[in-house]
Image: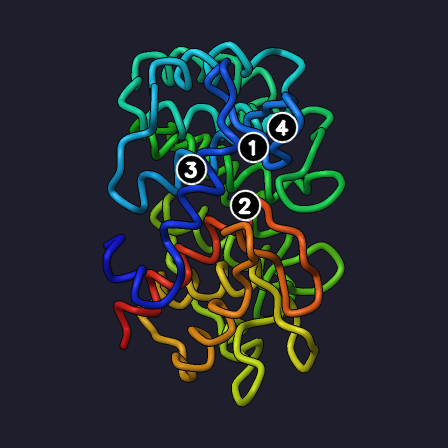
C-alpha cells in the first residue's frame, strides 16, 4: 500500500515527520519541540504505521506509554483510542484490561454516555455521539460483544441524534452522520443516507464539507464521507478532484493540513489524508 501512495504524495517526508516527533517515553507529540506526548498523537502515529504496513519503532515503549496514559482522569475518547491502538500493536490483553476503565466512563446500562465527556477528538468538548463512536471502535478492536440490552440502549441513544437524512446535534453533519452509521452498523443495524453525496465538492475544489452547499472542503469531512460511502457500498463521483485536493494538503515538513487555507500539520490530519487517499486509489 505504501508504494502505491508514494506515487501521489511524498511518503518519505511523512515518515520523517512522524519519526521526528517520537519521544523517549514511546509517545508522540505533533509539535516536535514539546515533550507533551499524548494519547491522541500516539494513536494516530500507530494508525499511520499500520496503514502503511510498517512496524512501530520501539513498539514496546509505545505500548507501555498507551497503557499507562489511559487513567481515570482520561476522557472516554482517549481511553478508547488507547484501547484500539494497543490492539493494533498486538497487546490485546492490555487493551482488554482497560475496558473496565472505559465502562466507568461509558455505561449505557446505567444511562452513562461518557461521564463529563471531556476532550473531543475533533473540536472542544466531545458530543455523546462522538464518544459512542469511539467506544464502539474500542469494542470492535478487542472483539467485545455487548449484551442485547446494551445494544438496544446504544441504538436508542444514537437515534436521538437523527435529523432528517443524517445525524447531528442541531443539524446533520458529515462527521456525526458517519459516527452514527458506523455505530449502528457495528450493532447490526443498516441505515441509508444521501448526506455524503450532498456534501461532495467537485470541480476545482474537490473534497467534502460538513454540510451541503458550503465551502471550503476540509480533510475531516472528506475522511468521514469517504468512509461513509464505503460503508454504504457506494463510491465518490469526483475521485480525481478529491485526490488532487488531498495532494495539495501536504506541507513542507511532510505532514498534512486541514484545508487549502489552514496550514498547520497534525498527526490527525496526516492520517486522515493518507487513509482517504488509500480509499480513493482503490476506486480509481
**Residue 119: percent from left, percent from top:** 70, 32
Residue bearing mark 4: 111
Can residue 144 be spotted in the picture? no
Query: Residue 185 vs residue 259: left or right?
Result: left
Local crowd at mark 1 within 10 Å, few (<14), some, or many (≥20)? many
Q: Please give the residue where the numbered disc 1 appears in the rendered image.
A: 40
Please give the residue where the numbered disc 3 appears in the rendered image: 137
Query: Farthest bottom residue?
Result: 203
The C terminus - image quarter:
bottom left
- Image quadrant where one finds the N terminus: bottom left
Q: Quadrant of residue 64?
A: top left
Residue 251 versus residue 155: which sits nearer the camera?
A: 251
Residue drawn at (58%, 15%) of the image: 104
Neighbour class for label 2 at 10 Å: few (<14), some, many (≥20)? many
Nearer to us of marks 4 and 3 is 3
The answer, for residue 259, to whether it is visible in the render is yes
Q: In the rendered image, which residue does mark 2 sit on?
A: 268
Q: Position of residue 108 (x, y in %)?
A: 55, 28
Amino acid at each position: 500500500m505504501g508504494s502505491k501512495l508514494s506515487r501521489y504524495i511524498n511518503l518519505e517526508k511523512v515518515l520523517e515527520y512522524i519519526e521526528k516527533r517520537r519521544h523517549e517515553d514511546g509517545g508522540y507529540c505533533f509539535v516536535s519541540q514539546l515533550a507533551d506526548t499524548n494519547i491522541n498523537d500516539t494513536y494516530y502515529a500507530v494508525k499511520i504505521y499500520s496503514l502503511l504496513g510498517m512496524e512501530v519503532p520501539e513498539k514496546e515503549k509505545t505500548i507501555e506509554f498507551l497503557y499507562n496514559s489511559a487513567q481515570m482522569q482520561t476522557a472516554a475518547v482517549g481511553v478508547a483510542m488507547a484501547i484500539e491502538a494497543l490492539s493494533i500493536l498486538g497487546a490485546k490483553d492490555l487493551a482488554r484490561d482497560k475496558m473496565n476503565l472505559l465502562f466507568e466512563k461509558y455505561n449505557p446500562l446505567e444511562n452513562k454516555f461518557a461521564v463529563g465527556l471531556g476532550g473531543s477528538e475533533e473540536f472542544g468538548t466531545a458530543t455523546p455521539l462522538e464518544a459512542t463512536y469511539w467506544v464502539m471502535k474500542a469494542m470492535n478492536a478487542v472483539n467485545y460483544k455487548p449484551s442485547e440490552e446494551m445494544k438496544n440502549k446504544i441504538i436508542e441513544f444514537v437515534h436521538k441524534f437523527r435529523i432528517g437524512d443524517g445525524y447531528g446535534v442541531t443539524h446533520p453533519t458529515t462527521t456525526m452522520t458517519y459516527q452514527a452509521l458506523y455505530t449502528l452498523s457495528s450493532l447490526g443495524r443498516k441505515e441509508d443516507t444521501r448526506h455524503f453525496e450532498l456534501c461532495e465538492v467537485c470541480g476545482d475544489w474537490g473534497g467534502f464539507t460538513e454540510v451541503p452547499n458550503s465551502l471550503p472542503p476540509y480533510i475531516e469531512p472528506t475522511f468521514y464521507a469517504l468512509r461513509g460511502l464505503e460503508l454504504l457500498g457506494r463510491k465518490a463521483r469526483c475521485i480525481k478532484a478529491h485526490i488532487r485536493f488531498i495532494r495539495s494538503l501536504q506541507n513542507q515538513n511532510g505532514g498534512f493540513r486541514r484545508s487549502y487555507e489552514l496550514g498547520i500539520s497534525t498527526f490527525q490530519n496526516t492520517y486522515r489524508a493518507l487513509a482517504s487517499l488509500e480509499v480513493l486509489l482503490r476506486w480509481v
